[in-house]
Amino acid sequence: MNKSELLSLFSSDYEKYYKVSLFEKLGFIRQSCSVCSRFFWAIPQRSICPDHENYTFIGNPPTSRRFSYTQSWEKIKDYFEKNGHSIVNRYPVVCRWRDDLYYTIASIVDFQRVADGKVMFELPHNPLVVPQTCLRFNDIENVGITGRHYTSFCMVGQTCDADSNGGYWKDKCIDLDFGLLVDIFGISPAEITFVEDVWIGAGAFGSSLEYFVRGLELGNAVFTEFEGTEKNHRVLKNKIIDMGAGLERLSWITNGTPTSYDCTFESVLKRIYEMSGMDNLFSSNRNNNYQSKILSDYFSRISAKLQSTSDVLQVKKQIAQELSVDFEKLQKIVVPYESLYTIIDHTRTLVFAISDGSLPSNVGGGYNLRVILRRTLSLLKQLGLGFKVTDIVDLHLDQLRPLYPELMDYRNDIHEILDIECKRFIETQDRIVTISTKIKKGKTKLSLDDLIRLYESDGVTPDYLVENGLLDAVPANFYTRLSELHSTNRSEKRDKKEFNMDDNIDLDSSKGTTLMYYDDPLRYSFNAKILKIINKNLVVLDKTCFYPRGGGQEPDFGYIGDYKVDNVVKIKDKLFHHVVGTFEQNEGDLIDCVVEKERRLAITKNHTATHIINHASRSVLGSWVWQNSAYKDETYARLDITHHSALSREEMQEIERKANDIVRRNLPVMINWHSRGMAEQNYGFRIYQGGVVPTNDVRIVNIGGLDIEACGGTHVFNTGELGLIKILKTERIQDGVVRIEFVAGENALNRVQDQDNQIQYIVNKLGTNRDKILETFSKNIDESDKSKKKIKNLLRRISIASVDQINNDSVVLKSESNEDRFLKYYFKIDEEFDDEFHLLVGQTSTERNPDLVYISVIIMENKSAKIIVFCGKNATKIVKANTIASQLSKMLGGSGGGTPNFGQGGGNMIESLPGMSEAVRKILIEKLNETTEKD
């Protein structure tokens, strides 16, 4: 859908889409901008729209009152409460309820849910207002420079379902927003301009009115009215008002400070200024100082002028001329403040993201967090203020406490995560210095791709390169490009490709499958009617007890009649049972079916254990632990959790201990269905451990009030049924994700007994008893180490003694046309000595005889062969060891390589060994003659 075409369509009927009662009542006039032709409404006559106005409120606020950041919210909150709105707490900045977003990017996202592929709006109250913290990473370069850009900001969301109880539409919405500006903030009606616009997104669209004061956009009232396209649309059953206003901007307009950061982060900046000695732009006497005056004038101008980062340098130089200040001198004054503003913004973003369960990493949304954290650390180092990131975090927590008191609960978690990340950053510094030295020596101009590679591979930030004179300036779109490279759609979709089904097969016309495994989970045999047979091996029944693959749980096996069922998948409202062989029944037949009971019970226990392990992991490790993915099968299960480091053995054992404590307590596993909105209100967004629920009704699995999740899987009735949970192993499978493999029930006991049998085997082999196993094992290890040392010394003596014999046994080869060109070679296939012996012999022999090529082929215990090649100093002028190793390894079906002096390789095709001696001779003769020809 084309936005400009839609705007033109709505503007052609402006009385229907844009003219509200307030405009007529107060005399707002519809006008057209002489620059861009956009239509806007204002009381006085204006020649241009607000997009082309300067920020004339800086230093001269149009409000009759001055409100701090938190005071601004309190005034807004009181105003809307008095006007019949419910105030709801912010939703998490990590968008768990949408599978296409990592972070909450707007207040309306709080109330958007996806059901059956369609976006719906679900409001907990109507109407409502929410102070929603939003995260956006598409303008990272602008942050700190323009005075108004943020990676995290508070969108005051005024939301209303116009067609439900308590709802209203355009007239009242604009009346309310206008009243907020005039009655609460004390802005004159003549200062307010409304600009016509449109909004498109999430399968719906509508007109919108943006409102500005003295060039600054304060809010945008979106009237989501239609679904479809501009040429073929229909009115929504429930029209939605989505007004979003920036709290940072509303506070800014009342204070008129040089940047919005000065009032948004007022107390944070004040404390940093006190500790650092930097000049406080917000202080009442700031204009008494020349530098403060320059800073104030500079930021006032750049906030108004800079619309994108593509012309940053040009705009800065223009402002320097206007201020009659040398550009380089201006930069020295300004850059520390730009850096400080950036640091403070980025740390606030990290506070919200980590509190809500997102970790800095190299994958997914966490990548953006690591980008801004490392940028912060680089800028902190440049400024040399002596602060730690966590010091600034604490300042944020203190300032945000009145607005977001819940953040204080996560202070220790935020500190722990950031301390770990800072340590990792410091550990990269030596490598960064080495890389920077190479760049300096190379004197090559770095491209944007070079900078991205340096950042991703080595952690070198462009800010660091600028600081060290290796880069003139950070490219305007560097951080945005990084963000885009790692911002992928998270949604996954199961479709007909699961079974190679024809896309033309109609899945909608026939009846759906009744799912019996929820209402009667202990039923394993049933009689059903065959509704559809596809490809002679896919069976759709009218009802089924077979559980399909889904949510990480593997499917039930069993029988439909005499046909083995080895896979079950749910697509839309039907379950497809895959049978082994050709299904020779007819559609419409009744048939007996049996679910494999033992498999179902084992998977069920492993699934409940997954929930318990998830809770135990969060209890032991920290609040940032979320399920990343999970797999539950008959013999074992695995849970991938979000965590910053590999688990220690102590952590693993503590998780296992807590999990089994829950088992021993025999807690009830309660399963109930709730409306999605009610489930979210009652239990929060932790219910979305397994991902988004694509239906209006949510099945909640509650394990004794400890772990509460939305889950469609099978579960036991109480935790005692599990008997035992045994963790098998843990590993860090990627940055920020740890995998825990475990098993529950009878299989857990079997694993414990297997481990016990292995211990007994070791006891028997050591000839000791269990009480002394560690003592005996340590003694044997010590004796083994001593034996290895003796063997190594013996091998060294043998190798030295073998050198003369090797020299005598070596074969001399000469080139056909130049007898002065020659080399000696020694070749041996050895089943007696290992590679350690041949490494010693080969190196010693070629050091003593520089004309020698030493080649050994060692037969390994697994019936493969390893090749070792050494070339003496003179021999390398004729042939390279790595070349020989590579060619001989190919004969064995493997590969090899190395350096001119030393090569190694190998392969499994030992049947090729008989011809290898002659192959070596041919390779060397060929190289001798090649050398002669080149000479």
Image (tube, rainbow, N blue to C red):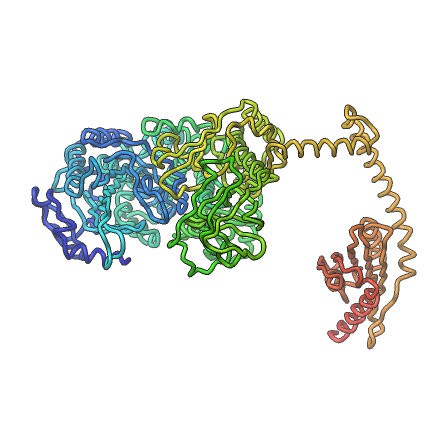
| Res 98 quadrant in image | top left
Residue 839, compared with residue 350, is above or below; it is below
| Res 158 quadrant in image | top left
Point out residue 401 in the picture as x, y percentages from the top left corner.
35, 27
Q: Quadrant of the image for the C terminus? A: bottom right
Q: Residue furthest bottom?
A: 817
Q: Nearer the viewer, residue 128 or 699?
A: 699
Point out residue 221 in the picture as x, y percentages from the top left corner.
22, 44
Q: Nearer the viewer, residue 552 or 80?
A: 552
For residue 776, say whether it is visible: yes
Q: Nearer the viewer, residue 843 or 920?
A: 920
Q: Could you tell whether 207 is left or right of 518 in the image?
A: left
Q: Quadrant of the image for the N terminus? A: bottom left
Q: Could you tell whether 232 is left or right of 563 in the image?
A: left
Point out residue 503 in the picture as x, y percentages from the top left corner.
44, 60
Q: Could you tell whether 481 is left or right of 724 in the image?
A: left
Q: Residue furthest top?
A: 665
> In the image, what residue occupies the spot 45% across and 45% down?
543
Point out residue 192 in the picture as x, y percentages from the top left corner.
15, 43
> In the image, what residue occupies the spot 28% across and 51% down?
200
For residue 386, say whether it is visible: no
Q: Nearer the viewer, residue 722 or 613?
A: 722
> In the image, what residue occupies the spot 35% across and 47% down?
142
